[in-house]
Image (spheres, coloured by chain):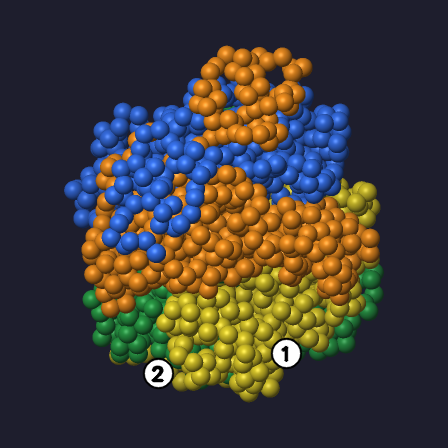
Chain colours: A green, B yellow, C orange, D blue
Amino acid sequence: MQDPTVSLRSFPTSLARLEYLENTCGIKLNNLKENLLEGDLGENIIGGITIPLGVAGPLSLSGLHAKGDYFIPFATTEGGLVASINRGCKAISESGGAHVFSDKVGTTRGPVFSVKSRNSGEALKKWINENTSKIKEASESTSKHLKFKKVDITPVASYVFMRFYFDTDSAMGMNMVTFATDAISKLIEANTEAKCISIAGNYDIDKKPAWLNFIEGRGFKAWGEVVIPQKVVRGTLKTTSEKIFEVWLSKCMIGSAMSGSIGFNAQISNIVAAFFAATGQDLAHVVDGSLGITIAKVVNEDLYLSVYIPSLLMGIVGGGTGRPTQNDAIKLTGVKSSDEAAEILVGAALAGELSLLASLAEGSLATAHKSLGRKK
Amino acid sequence: MQDPTVSLRSFPTSLARLEYLENTCGIKLNNLKENLLEGDLGENIIGGITIPLGVAGPLSLSGLHAKGDYFIPFATTEGGLVASINRGCKAISESGGAHVFSDKVGTTRGPVFSVKSRNSGEALKKWINENTSKIKEASESTSKHLKFKKVDITPVASYVFMRFYFDTDSAMGMNMVTFATDAISKLIEANTEAKCISIAGNYDIDKKPAWLNFIEGRGFKAWGEVVIPQKVVRGTLKTTSEKIFEVWLSKCMIGSAMSGSIGFNAQISNIVAAFFAATGQDLAHVVDGSLGITIAKVVNEDLYLSVYIPSLLMGIVGGGTGRPTQNDAIKLTGVKSSDEAAEILVGAALAGELSLLASLAEGSLATAHKSLGRKK
Amino acid sequence: MQDPTVSLRSFPTSLARLEYLENTCGIKLNNLKENLLEGDLGENIIGGITIPLGVAGPLSLSGLHAKGDYFIPFATTEGGLVASINRGCKAISESGGAHVFSDKVGTTRGPVFSVKSRNSGEALKKWINENTSKIKEASESTSKHLKFKKVDITPVASYVFMRFYFDTDSAMGMNMVTFATDAISKLIEANTEAKCISIAGNYDIDKKPAWLNFIEGRGFKAWGEVVIPQKVVRGTLKTTSEKIFEVWLSKCMIGSAMSGSIGFNAQISNIVAAFFAATGQDLAHVVDGSLGITIAKVVNEDLYLSVYIPSLLMGIVGGGTGRPTQNDAIKLTGVKSSDEAAEILVGAALAGELSLLASLAEGSLATAHKSLGRKK
Amino acid sequence: MQDPTVSLRSFPTSLARLEYLENTCGIKLNNLKENLLEGDLGENIIGGITIPLGVAGPLSLSGLHAKGDYFIPFATTEGGLVASINRGCKAISESGGAHVFSDKVGTTRGPVFSVKSRNSGEALKKWINENTSKIKEASESTSKHLKFKKVDITPVASYVFMRFYFDTDSAMGMNMVTFATDAISKLIEANTEAKCISIAGNYDIDKKPAWLNFIEGRGFKAWGEVVIPQKVVRGTLKTTSEKIFEVWLSKCMIGSAMSGSIGFNAQISNIVAAFFAATGQDLAHVVDGSLGITIAKVVNEDLYLSVYIPSLLMGIVGGGTGRPTQNDAIKLTGVKSSDEAAEILVGAALAGELSLLASLAEGSLATAHKSLGRKK
């Protein structure tokens, strides 16, 4: 096919790479050509793909950080999703708004070390616990934006798994915590006989669905809850609290149990994915953000609905958040901290759960998707 | 804040919505304004966000559907990711290419029905199993692109959970299977006393991490494997097979076990997320695609590496695949079917695993991220 | 301590071993001495331990196999357990009895084979699927009590995991299926290039909690359900249906979800353990039997309660069922098949769930344990 | 069948109950009749079932609490099990003994409370954390053997899940922690607006397999490790370190991963079940004790083997440990504390893993079970 002596990396610009690919493959990539990015990002970049950006809201929230009415951006190609979230936002706002909460657990990096024996592992654990000030110092020397929070240590066989938690300020901070953990690893290797096998030993655990993240939390833990008066349930949501409860119980609890799932919810990942795409988060962290439990109750005939997401990895600076359109999307939200961002996201997730559960209860999911099938 | 009597939906164009938001929030969204989409997609769309698109390859593959050298597109804001995958592609191609395989299990929709008792549940199960030809007919009447494959039925208490599998041709087909299942549900309700509680009862199970999908498969099951001669391990990957094995064992197997994870791998979700974003897949399906197991072995001093992803939901027509830039990205791959697309994705995942495991083994992860930190 | 040249195995009788231990350790084991077993079982047996045997019932059941009123034996040292089950039996019988069902999925053995590549794995899978009649013949030649049912095959990397299901008649049959699988393995090795790494590759999966057993079933799947009229709920159970529902929802569903559990129930394992000990089952199979989901509903003001146990490994002949006292315990139940035994066990589990949930709802658990603390 | 007006509970002795059952069912229960227990335990007890008790050892251990050579009792009806453990003990002792460790995490009780909202849940969490001295006092007033250790609190929706950890001295202490938690619950209800829904809310989580117990530990965490020189591997175990490693990797790690298991081991539950039956532990806690991970390595040509069991619920006083034969079995071990008992159990589990993995590696499992099939 292509001349094997030529590498994409040898071209100086996206356009040159694009045209090389067009020539090599004998195709025309006109849409990409019209979507070249400014400057050159290196790494074989040939342009940009564009995802439609919709806005839901205003969503009325009352939280530790989020207070007020928010417009929330969602980048998605799934027809009907923004409309669905928007309906949920409307119902929540009509009900006086949702309560939201975030708890910054911290971004984790989890190296695995090799030691001689379980005894040596215990000794290593002891050394670390007695030298947290040195560990704090070594890790915090790598960035002024990073604070060491704590470490969990689990020795098993001749391995020692560690899970370092860091406050990475307004950034999600995965790179920051890698550098910090690298410094910690060097400190440990210099002072003990332990050897770092891998700076990332899946005890972080990053971008894989895992109970450790559900139970301990990672990034942000976030909660949202709302009481929807029966008038709004019947009006805006076109169903009853009792029916929503029935769908929730059979689907989110029993259905998820029967499926061996870590997610006990209706569609949290949809809202996380679209918000992450809009605001420049790492899209593989949709996996961590898909964990979560939605809980419904009928109180009198009103509907109480709550969402808990234990592992939200996100920030408002760094990584993709600095990309031009993504940065505008963040600007649109008006959030001033990643804590506030986590709270509006969990509020939006609550809206999404509300709307989808109502749609399923009413039996309109198929119809809705037919009428909202997005025009391309 | 905003005039509550005005709704975003009342504006006829993206630009009008965007300017309304600018006025209401008192901000300027210049980057989004420069990125308006052609036409109007409705649903509160105000423009598009752009994600840098990089290309890895050529990757030499030999599969049931994928045969030859492929350029593979990845949309990501994570600096270093495309370079990392590209290094893996290089190592694989230098080793004579990877073997890949895909098995189209089918897209599932899993409704939950209510019956009077476990006895009635058994009767319903019997009715369905005796009337699969009617079910086939009813479901296939909803689309000429859809074929009914099979159904798994699990009665529990007064619930009956079903999992219908459909071949949706070249599309991922989530909407298609919803319409088909809607038709089936109506057929069941017309012929039995069972009542559909929810057309989607989390026995699908869609967009939540779940053992049911790992064990039974969903969408595509896909496998990839390669033998990397020690010369390539030492040259291109700058480490040894033994060290990669050691990292794999302690991280992907023991670390994942200690974390209660459904994913026994290094970074499959990264590759799935970036490929899905590039090619217009549903980004919440990154969750399903994050399941998977990577297995390493040292054979003589060569490295055998294998990846198995049991739940890949993807297509090459429909949904976001029709968006202009995403369509170009698919065109770039040259694939002719979703089966072929699944095979190049699993091949790319293999490249990603190879490169990250090598980087961890060599101890260069932190360094690599420092030097490849993407320019914005 | 002891003379290292002397081994317990060198003594011809339990008594001789017991006295050797008494002498070596300088202790008196009078209670064991009074509990010597008849004959000599070998294997360093020095006597027998005795567990109190209680009886609950009569429990009124209507099942595929179990029909009528049953006395059910439980061997346990936990004070209050038999009384608790007995109260549940009473409530069920007062409500007209429970419906029970068992489905003999089959005892599994799951070897793991080594092949050259994923391609060879596919070939092996094909060979097996095309030669099931030979596999049936080879396996059934090992015992007249064993029937081959089916096989599930999952190739991954250079491994092929298999899960053979056998009908082992009235026995639990773990040894039987080991011999049968040994014969199959030899057949496979003689006809293909695959090599059996381990005749038990944890794809059985035996005596470890696992989603594979929950989802596919193992041994028996068993269901029980009952409607308890509010009069009985208030009278015998001293609480209300609504309160039981509230405890069930928060404990068995939400609490189990928050804990990352495979068991969504109150105390199924208690009933399984005590019944298994009474009837000579393999006590490590309590692990498999602990999987299960209990579901409650309030129907009008009556209580609907249901139990589903997907992985009951048990029999009425073979293994410990032939021990004298255990055999009497089986005789007491009057069951004629292992299917019937599985049904009375699931009925008893239903009684146990009912009673404990009621006790928790009423707030009497602590009090009950104080008053029922068993005399030693 | 029986006269419904007569209840088993109305008879004053075991013999009277037994004879009533014989008459009612028209059967003879001679073996049980010969096995009547002294005194009357109430609760419908009709006698005792007897399980053969074998002894393995001496097993040479070096731990925090266990130091020296131990004979270890196992009550089981599984032919071959004691012989298998004994072989493992022999190999370990020939290798100079195993290192063992136990860490008393504490027995947990996990109530679930109802509050008005997530905000109230946070307030409740705060109240508890600020009043741990009162909680300590209230709980410790219920028993002089109990010490409050710590509490983990997780609010979700309008529920608050708590997990109280207690040191229960030499007892497993499940009843003790129930009484203590009852006192705490009353304290909380008296001082806050929270209401206890269930004193046991499955956040304990008791007798169900769950990741929470694997990750946080429950009862005792226990580790064991040993290096078996190749001479012993070849001699006593009749195989090679490399083969054992291969079986371990494919079975305990990859096989367990493929099965969605919480147990990454060969047969830990067998050893736990037989030791628990012998020493009067609660047999439903075999479920908790089945969690665990075995890890093998080849070091030069020697075999390094390690076992980690995170959730061992056991004691040496209280409950069934006081039964005559069980008490003798404990006496035989010579242990002076439950910590020491946990260490000899994990040492025995290591022996069991070693022996079974060797047997599988050598291909002798089927043969061994044939020859060791126990005489009844």
Mark 1 or mark 2: which is in front? 1
Left or right position of A174 against A244: right
Q: CA distance from mark 1 to mark 2?
A: 37 Å
Sort mark 2 into few (<14), some (14-19) or many (20+) by Cα contacts within 10 Å: few
Does residue C124 appear in this view?
A: yes
Q: Earlier in the sequence, mark 1 or mark 2?
A: 2
Q: Secondary structure at mark 2?
A: helix
Identify which residue, B310 or B238, lies in the foreground. B310
Figure check: A260 above or below B39: above
Residue depicted at 47% across the width and 83% down the height: B187
* Callout 1 amino acid: Asp
Residue B169, labelled with which disc? 1
Residue C186 screen position, x and y as percent? 77, 50
Figure check: A211 above or below D106: below
Identify which residue, D345 or D20, lies in the foreground. D20
> Is the same chain shared between marks 1 and 2?
yes
Residue D23 screen position, x and y as percent? 36, 47
Residue depicted at 50% across the width and 78% down the height: B127
Residue depicted at 44% across the width and 26% down the height: D325
Residue B10, labelled with which disc? 2
Q: Are marks 1 and 2 in contact (CB under 8 Å)?
A: no
Residue D148 screen position, x and y as percent? 31, 31
Does residue A280 appear in this view?
A: no
Q: Splitting the image into 4 quarters, where does residue B83 fall? A: bottom right
Identify which residue, B323 or C342, lies in the foreground. C342
Q: Splitting the image into 4 quarters, where does residue C132 fall? A: bottom right
Left or right position of A7 against D175: right
Q: Splitting the image into 4 quarters, where does residue D110 fall? A: top left
Q: Secondary structure at mark 1?
A: loop
